[in-house]
Amino acid sequence: MKKRSSPDIIATILEAANGGIGKTGLLTKANLTSTQLKKYMDFLLEKEFLAKREDRSGRHSAYKTTGLGLKYLALYNSIKSVAYINA
């Protein structure tokens, strides 16, 4: 299996969270360990690429990609498409 770069992993998380998703769903879609996911989630929340929303009970959280996160995805996809054209 090819090792993914941090920008690739970040893009995967942001794409998965675009419609809103729980932590378990992110673990599955991003194919990360809980330790790895926590590291990326902390970073993305701090940089405001992701927003965390809790339900009324406070027991369940959902994560959603913010406008800034969507800008990251757009730039990431542009760079990726240029890299493939020039490869």
Image (spheres, grey):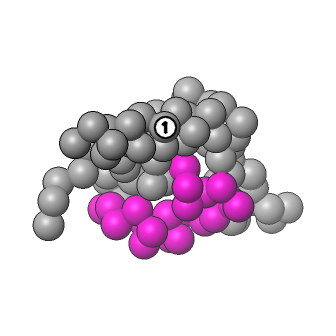
The answer to whether one can see residue 27 in this image is yes
Q: Nearer the viewer, residue 52 or 49?
A: 49
In the shown orientation, is residue 47 left or right of residue 86?
right
Residue farthest to the right?
56
Q: How many marks?
A: 1
In the rendered image, the residue lying farthest to the top is: 47
- Which residue is painted at 15% across and 59% down in the image? 2
For residue 63, side relative to residue 2 (left or right): right
**Residue 81 sits above or below residue 22 on the image:** above
Residue at point 34% right, 66% down? Answer: 31
Query: Mark 1 sits on what residue?
Result: 78
Q: Residues within 10 Å of mark 1 (few under 14, many from 20)?
A: few
**Magenta-drawn segment:** 14-33
Q: Which amino acid is tagged 1?
A: Ser
Give me the residue at 52% from left, 33% from top: 75
Q: Position of residue 1 (x, y in %)?
A: 14, 67
Any part of residue 44 in sight:
no
